[in-house]
Amino acid sequence: MSQEPLVNELSIDERIEKFKSILEGNEYEEVIVQKYIVHGTPYIFKDDEDKYFDLKREIAAHFSTYYSGIHYNNIHMVGSAKLGFSIAPSKLWKPFDFESDIDVVIVSSKLFEKIWEDIHQFNIDLTSRSQQEEKNYRRFLNYFFKGWIRPDLFPFEYSAKDNWFTFFEKISYKKYGPQKITGALYHSFNFFEKYHIENINNIRTLKR
């Protein structure tokens, strides 16, 4: 039997309990991801959903300047800003607050492959890596293998990294909320969905 969606009127504690009850039910992980993580207005914009549209449009417009073909539907909000609480393993059930980040992801094979090409060329041209750069590189590759680029783990200093962080710093702490806005990149929706399905399955395993 399908679960009712999380309603905006619930407090964060009530939303957490409702989500826990959903996990204890028989809903497929794929459906939970689609219904609660991908679909719907984020918790932080529950009283002004137009801001979510504006945020997605601004991000899409910016990255379309560098890489054509980015659409606002390529942008998704995740994490505690979306649900009202975190489902990340290290911060499980932590409520969204003023110190939380607003996490968004871009799902675009074109952007992913362009950055992939840049990093590949940069790596070829680089003669050596420091110990810390090598450590970051190995961590970066772990996520990259899963179809996910985490800019905070970019192994080297190059223009795409600077552009990425400059943009997200520019839109942080302003009209979308008094929080930092961070971004990550997935090659395809399939990779994006698989990551969250795996996370939901892991949470369910912990609860058994």
Image: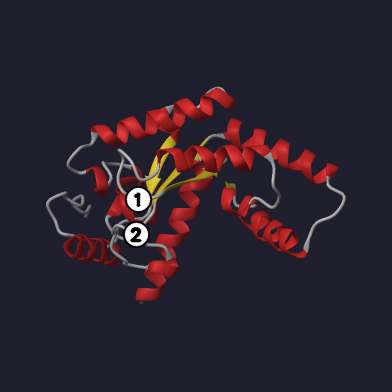
Residue 92's image quarter?
Answer: bottom left
Image position of 201 with respect to 141: above or below: below
N-terminal of the pair, mark 2 or mark 1, is: 2
**Label 2 SS:** loop
**Label 1 SS:** loop
Tell me residue 50's x, y (percent).
24, 32
Image position of 4 with respect to 76: above or below: below
**At 71% from the left edge and 56% from the top edge, which residue is drawn?**
137
Residue 163 shown left or right of residue 122 in the figure: left
**At 66% from the left edge and 33% from the top edge, which residue is drawn?**
114
Tell me residue 100's x, y (percent).
35, 58
Image position of 135 with respect to 165: above or below: below
Q: CA distance from mark 2 to mark 1?
A: 7 Å
Residue 179 got which mark?
1
Tell me residue 115's x, y (percent).
65, 37
Pointers 2 and 1 in contact (CB under 8 A)?
yes
Q: What sort of colour scheme is used for the picture?
A: secondary structure
Pointer 2 residue: 99
Q: Nearer the viewer, residue 191 or 166?
A: 166
Judge the density around disc 1: few (<14), some (14-19), many (≥20) Cα neighbours within 10 Å.
some
Judge the density around disc 2: few (<14), some (14-19), many (≥20) Cα neighbours within 10 Å.
few
Amino acid beneath label 1: Gln
Residue reaching furthest bottom? 208
Image position of 148 with respect to 171: above or below: below
**At 38% from the left edge and 44% from the top edge, which residue is drawn?**
77
Residue 135's image quarter?
Answer: bottom right
Amino acid beneath label 2: Glu
**At 27% from the left edge and 56% from the top edge, which residue is drawn?**
84
Please identify the quadrant where the N terminus is shown.
Answer: bottom left
Residue 99's image quarter?
Answer: bottom left
Residue 89 shown left or right of residue 36 in the figure: right
Tell me residue 53's x, y (percent).
31, 31
